Image (cartoon, rainbow, N blue to C red):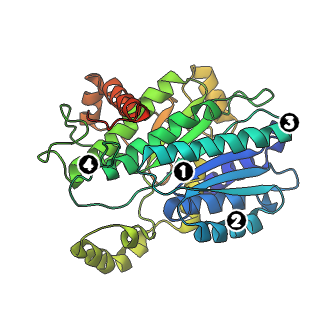
Amino acid sequence: MVAIATVRAANAAKAAAASAEPSGRPYVAVFAGGTSGIGERAVRALASNHGPSAGPSRRPLRAYIIGRKQAVADALMAECAAACGPGGEFVFIKTEDLAMLRDVDAACAEIARLEEAASAREGHEAKIDLLVATQGVLYFGGRMDTSEGLDRHFSLMYYSRLRLVTNLLPLLTSLPSGSPSSTPGHVVSVFNPNLEGKLAASDLSLRGAENFGFVALSSHIALFTTFAFEALAARHPGRLALSHYYPGFVMTDIASKSPIPRWASLAWKLCTPVVKLFAVGDDDCGQYVDFLASGRYAAARGGDQVEAAAAADSLEVAVGADGGVGSGAYRVHWNGDIIQPKKQTDAYRRDGMVEKVWEHTLAAFAAVDAGKAFDG
């Protein structure tokens, strides 16, 4: 376990490091699903970390929050602005449906436009330091295809999240002149690596009714996230670090906003008093998410460079999803520990599933780009 005191110290040091950016470039973060749940907690923690407690030389912060509800976002941003104080900027990017890749594309285009304009005004190159994707719901029903040919819930928790990453790659992988070479872009997808299980290799989209179900869908989302992150880390050494993160039990509103059956809703209500006893606190949850942008979770590079990235935060570099130290893609437990690999996941990796999942993902994106419904 990474002690919460260590986490807070690393986050505070990151927020206070204005001298590390001679150009005065702010720390830039993007939160998809940031108006509620885990995302909201991460936004609040980041705002607090960049507040007055970080000292007079604290680094400015700009956070883009992607969501559906303007009023909810306005209230959150007002509270975060008060906590952060001068130097904090919070921008709401309104979307209708993040299960639709075209909506993701529109949100990313607006973020890129705004960030390029802001960086031009401020006199530095544009960069996104952190992308956190938390959009999703609980779902126990059957397959529901969108007009883009993707299962709605598979898209919400995997395809749309990867689309965010690929759309924002130029800004995530940018290394502005004057910035430390040990500060890659960081990506966090909040799901659960522990759910990695069986993979239907002949039906990656889970189109067959015999393959689709809660367990199968959860397994595919988990495996796809881990493997896609490994593929991206290998393609962007030194510039991109990605974490597939399990937040543990956190008291959010996901059960009340999800289309779950009555039995599941009742079960949740009955279990809530017990879950509260073991739940991760709201602020701790947000702090651990923001900590995933520390040097402990370094981009894939040579050994000396990886050690330098972690040393900058006085942290031990973590073991990556593929078993290599500092390999750029990580499977992380709620408390910052690395989730141990599963033999079955390792076997899929040896069988070439990392590249197969990545190629499948790009094929889905290409179909949507061409205005077609993906049928792969």
Dot 4 or dot 2: first in sequence order is 2
Residue 241, visible in the rendered structure: yes
- Residue visible at 78% across and 26% down in the picture: 177
Q: Nearer the viewer, mark 2 or mark 3?
A: 3
Dot 1 or dot 3: first in sequence order is 1
- How many other residues sit within 10 Å of disc 4, few (<14), some (14-19) or many (≥20)? many
Query: Are dots 2 and 3 in contact, CB under 8 Å?
Result: no
The secondary structure type at the circle numbered 2 is helix
Toward the viewer: 215 or 314? 215
Amino acid residing under circle 2? Cys
- Which residue bears the numbered disc 3? 123
Residue 208 appears left or right of 290? left
Dot 3 or dot 4: first in sequence order is 3
Dot 2 or dot 1: first in sequence order is 1
Q: Which mark is residue 2?
A: 1
- Residue visible at 82% across and 44% down in the picture: 18
Report, in whole angstroms, how far the alpha carbon at label 2 lies from the one at label 3: 25 Å
Toward the viewer: 8 or 121? 121
**Percent of width and height locating residue 162:** 45, 39
**Percent of width and height locating residue 135:** 46, 55
- Which residue bears the numbered disc 4? 217
Query: Relative to residue 253, is residue 51 depicted above or below?
Result: above
Amino acid residing under circle 4? Leu
The secondary structure type at the circle numbered 1 is loop
Residue 133 appears left or right of 305? left
Query: Are dots 3 and 4 in contact, CB under 8 Å?
Result: no
